[in-house]
Amino acid sequence: MPGSVTFCELPSLVEFVGVTRSYGSRVAVEDIHLGLDPGELVFLVGPSGAGKTTLLKLINREIRPTCGEVWVDGLPAHQLSASKVADLRRRVGVVFQDYKLLPRLTALENVAFALQVTDLRISDEEARDRGLDALDAVGLGDRADAFPHQLSGGQQQRVAVARAVVSQPPLLIADEPTGNLDVETAWQITDLLEDIANFGTTVLVATHNVEIVKRMQRRVLTLVDGRLVRDQPAGRVGRLAWAAWS
Amino acid sequence: MVVTRNAGRYLFHGAFRNWLRNLAGTAPALGSMTLLLLLSGLVGLSGFAMRNLAITEAHDASLLHVYLRDDATDDQVAALRARIEADHRVAGVGYTTKAQALARAQRRPGLPELVDATDSNPFPASLDVQVKQVSDVGAIDALVHDDAAVDPGYPTSYDQGAYQRIQQVMLGAAIAGAAFLLLLGFVALTVTANSIRSAIHARRDEVTIMQLVGAPRWMVRGPFVIEGALTGGFAGLAAGIVTLLISLALISAGSSSFAQVAPGVTVEVAIVAALLVFVVGIALGSGSSLFSLRKHLES
């Protein structure tokens, strides 16, 4: 129908087309076909060694696929030259299990650092304002001057999330973001990621936390032995096949 | 303005701060590079002096003195001179009288005593033949060897193989110097590259974060290149100053003998050599940084 473009008809933000990645003779992921739409919160689950981290690394162009195509926000990650990788990474926020904060910088400096090293046109004042906004958004506006060692694990992860979204990337990927956190804090971080998705950012979370995945009722991708064995749409409560194996 | 300030802060200020912080780790690279550059400067100056010596020797070697009999008549000398001048291999012919030969000998080290030991003038008059090519000197010598005007006992100054021997010695010295510098260069490059690798390792988290958030490559690599340039620059500065001081000390200690041993090495040349050492230090430092970055810092 002319003029009526629905959300589903928009091109995917992330597109995997027949992607295989091998390390020598070991196949990490095999023949992955996948699309992530803007504003989706998607969980990526599977047992250890299933290929979750490999899939995230393929999106962030830390590695290239052995064959197949990976498209991220219109960029061909599978064939980007090293000099163009930074362009892609500015479109992808990343959150890690171990936070990866710089210990000699305060929370605000950690966030502002990520902003300024990607765009030299940003002044100190603008970086500070935007950094404080991001910290406010994750509920840490009052701890901006604290160093990482003065923050709890959950707070450090919030700073890491603020750093990942401060430049407002269209995609956020998180590798086991609740892996080092207690149950209550894990839920807080998950709520935060959901809020981010609600504001239009695509969020892909690799996790082992079955409880969170079940209760969130969002789209779930299940990887087993490098193969995408299930793509469960949001709103359905399915059996997590891999959980019985892990 | 903002871009300049941010670039300056992340590249230059950051590099200088990290360089100072890692000074203990950089010290071996700084020392070996200073030594290399100092030796390079001195070997370079020696090479320059040897090149000048070689030019002088080549000029001297192509100048053939044809010694004349004391009893040769003016007609015989004129005929010989005309015959030599007619040869296309000859650039020019001069004439030195016995008195001029004596005066020249008295200016050469060791010969005045020999001159004083005799009442007569032992030095013959000569035709001084400037041959165009050194390789033709032997042919000109053969041409004049049996002339009636030429001294049969000591006909010419031609010493077959003398010039070749000098050339061989200089070639050997040049090869040895180059090999020595290459070896030192390899050591300095390796040590500097290792110090940069340590710097990369020490700041691995920062580099990882920068790469993951999408900092441009030059922004990630730039500070390390500048750190290498700082190491090379300081080494070059120290080596340049020492090279200059040594050169000035040698020049002022014995200006006349130094000019003979190292012709062409003047104060101006020493300053240029010191500046070159400084510039080479910067290039070597940043070059070895780039080498290390390519090897140890994948995107």
Image (cartoon, coloured by chain):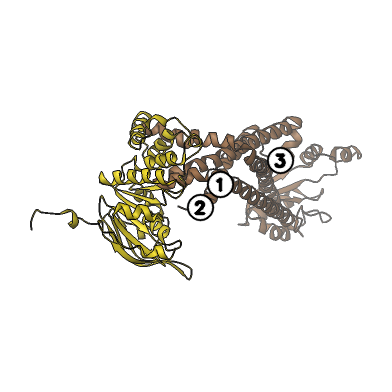
Which subunit holds the residue at mark 2? B
Which subunit holds the residue at mark 1? B
Indicate the amino acid at tag 1. Answer: His
Counting residues from the start of the chain, the first of labels 3 and 1 encountered is 1
Dot 1 crowding, Cα within 10 Å, few <14, some 14–19, many 20+: some
Q: Do labels 1 and 2 share a chain?
A: yes
The residue shown at (63%, 52%) is B186
Classify residue A67 as left or right of residue B62. left
Secondary structure at numbered mark 3 = loop
Secondary structure at numbered mark 2 = helix
Give the percent coordinates (x, y) of residue B13: 49, 33
Q: In which quarter of the image is the C terminus of chain A?
A: bottom left
Dot 3 crowding, Cα within 10 Å, few <14, some 14–19, many 20+: many
Relative depth, front residue between A82 and B130? A82
Classify residue A213 as left or right of residue B132. left
Q: In which quarter of the image is residue B24?
A: top right
Q: Residue B262 carries which label?
A: 3
Residue for badge 1 = B201
Q: Are marks 3 and 1 on the same chain?
A: yes
Depth-wise, is mark 2 or mark 3 nearer the camera?
2
Q: Report the Cα–Cα distance between label 2 and label 3.
A: 42 Å
Q: Report the Cα–Cα distance between label 1 and label 2.
A: 14 Å
Asked if residue A33 shows in the view, the reply is no
Q: Report the Cα–Cα distance between label 3 and label 1.
A: 47 Å
